[in-house]
Amino acid sequence: TPSLAAAIIFAVLSALTTFLHNYQMLRTRAWFLIWFILGGLSYIACAYSAYENLGKTCV
């Protein structure tokens, strides 16, 4: 099962870089950076899957 503590730590760390990428994307209109933002949001989903024990894994 995924670790909730590790998922929260990486969610916070990736949130910082996600906000930076979001700022850069909007400032320079570099729409290819949307993948970095979606990757940062995946850690939130991983933290949720660690909290909700539904037999699913975080990929």
Image: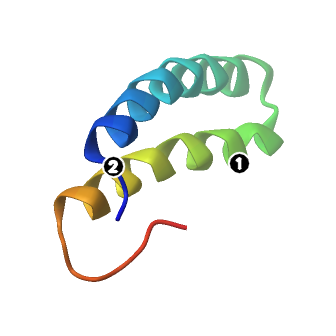
Q: Secondary structure at mark 1?
A: helix
Choose the circle earlier in sequence order: 1 or 2: 2
Question: Is 18 left or right of 35, judged from the image as shown?
Answer: left
**Which colour scheme appears in the figure?**
rainbow
The extreme bottom residue here reads 55
Quadrant the N terminus occupies: bottom left
For residue 2, what is the image quadrant? Answer: bottom left
Nearer to the camera, 45 or 1: 1
Q: Amino acid at mark 2?
A: Ser
Q: Position of residue 13 (x, y in %)?
A: 48, 22
Quadrant the C terminus occupies: bottom right
Q: Which mark is on residue 3?
A: 2
Question: Is 15 left or right of 45, judged from the image as shown?
Answer: right
For residue 34, what is the image quadrant? Answer: top right
Residue visible at 54% across and 40% down in the picture: 40
Residue visible at 37% across and 47% down in the picture: 44
Q: Amino acid at mark 1?
A: Trp
Cα–Cα span, label 1 and label 2: 24 Å
Nearer to the camera, 44 or 21: 44
Residue visible at 46% across and 32% down in the picture: 10
Q: Residues within 10 Å of mark 2 (few under 14, many from 20)?
A: few
Residue visible at 58% across and 49% down in the picture: 38
Compared to 50, does 17 lie above or below? above
Nearer to the camera, 21 or 26: 21
Compared to 50, does 13 lie above or below? above
Nearer to the camera, 20 or 44: 44
The extreme left residue here reads 52
Q: Position of residue 45 (x, y in %)?
A: 37, 56
Q: Residues within 10 Å of mark 1 (few under 14, many from 20)?
A: few
For residue 27, what is the image quadrant? Answer: top right
Q: Which residue is mark 1?
A: 35
